[in-house]
Image (cartoon, rainbow, N blue to C red):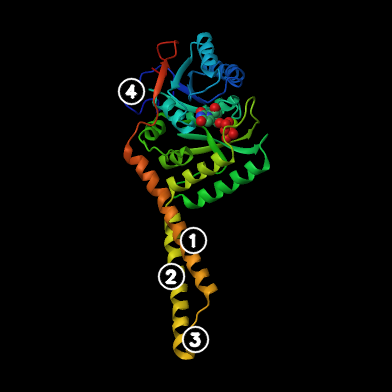
Amino acid sequence: MNPDSSPDGLPGNAPRDLLTVVVAAFNEADSLPLLHPRVAAVLDALAADGVGGRVLYVDDGSRDGTWEVLQALAAGDPRVALLRLSRNFGKEAALTAGLDRIETGAALILDADGQDPPELIPQFVAKWREGFDDVHGTRIERDGEGWIKRATAHAFYRVIGRLSKTPIPRDTGDFRLLSPRALAALRQLRERHRFMKGLFGWVGFNRISVPYQRDARVAGRSKFNLWRLWNFALEGITSFSTAPLRLATYLGLLTAAVAFAYGVLIIVKALVWSDPVAGWPTMMAVILFLGGVQLIALGLIGEYLGRLYEEVKQRPLYLVESWRPASGAADAVVA
Ligand code: UDP
Ligand code: MG
């Protein structure tokens, strides 16, 4: 029995460790029928080991047959709970919606496309039982992803790792197990711009990584193209670092210093050599350069200001269209 089965003040006399697998799905009608049997098999194995398991699928406003597929899965398996959002809110919001529904026990986050092998879950659970709060999968290889994606992902982890004050482990996605207390802590972070990788690190507690081989998608296409990944990177950097603002300050100082020195030079030239006509090209170059630097700095401030604006509005992170709890036993993890 895990010692922290209920640090959140919920009934602590649950007979077993409880684990809810949370899967965010957006247009995954082709992948889910392939994924669920694998998850179900793992839950069976866990049950034999004294861990009560549930699966919560969050339909993130899919436009294909995902919801119908999910309902069929739920009808055939009492351990399945379903949540449908009112529209596509994005993976981070969908995961948050799922995690918010877990009342007791630990959570495990899994991708719907089979890229995170469910077969690793027992390893994660073993680590949890050893007392770890955040067990995350670290990819040692990425199959089925082009070199551009690999190279940009690589660069991204290195940049964000240097900028963020709290640890953001490299090559680590959302595939992870959160103990009840880590989950409770994460749920207190209600920011609108949710860079989950950073939020997990911010929470702290005992963390450990489990290396794994990242497979290719079982079906369908990745929802994250390069443009979306770029925005995702911007999100990460602006959510977890103000270094760009500091950079703007230093860039400004440097430009001012150079401009000042150049100004002195021009004045001295005019006074000493009576050189009345400064070149039009130099003037143009200086004006354009200063204009460029100012616009960049303004844009940087705008990035932060825009995010501030969205936080201040305090809108809900997601809206639920329908909710179907697991029909299984009374110790249902999700209620
Ligand atoms: N996803 C989601 N909402 C979205 C985009 C993606 O819930 O708006 C889910 C998707 O169904 C999958 C997971 O997030 O389960 C990861 O998405 P994907 O495989 O497209 O990303 P990649 O693995 O290529 O980074
Ligand atoms: Mg994927």
Compared to residue 14, the image places residue 222 above or below, namely: below
Q: Which mark is residue 248?
A: none
The amino acid sitting under disc 3 is Asp
Residue 260, picture quadrant: bottom left
Residue sitting at x 60%, y 27%: 117
* Front: mark 1 or 2: 1
Q: In the rendered image, which residue does mark 2 sit on?
A: 256
* Front: mark 2 or 3: 3
Quick check: which quadrant has ligand 2?
Answer: top right
Label 1 with label 4: CB-CB less than 8 Å:
no
Front residue of this view, candidates 280 and 197: 280
Left or right relative to 1: residue 210: right
Q: In the rendered image, which residue does mark 3 sit on?
A: 275
User: Mark 1, residues whose alpha carbon is within 10 Å: few (<14), some, or many (≥20)?
Assistant: few
Residue sitting at x 46%, y 63%: 291
Label 3 with label 1: CB-CB less than 8 Å:
no
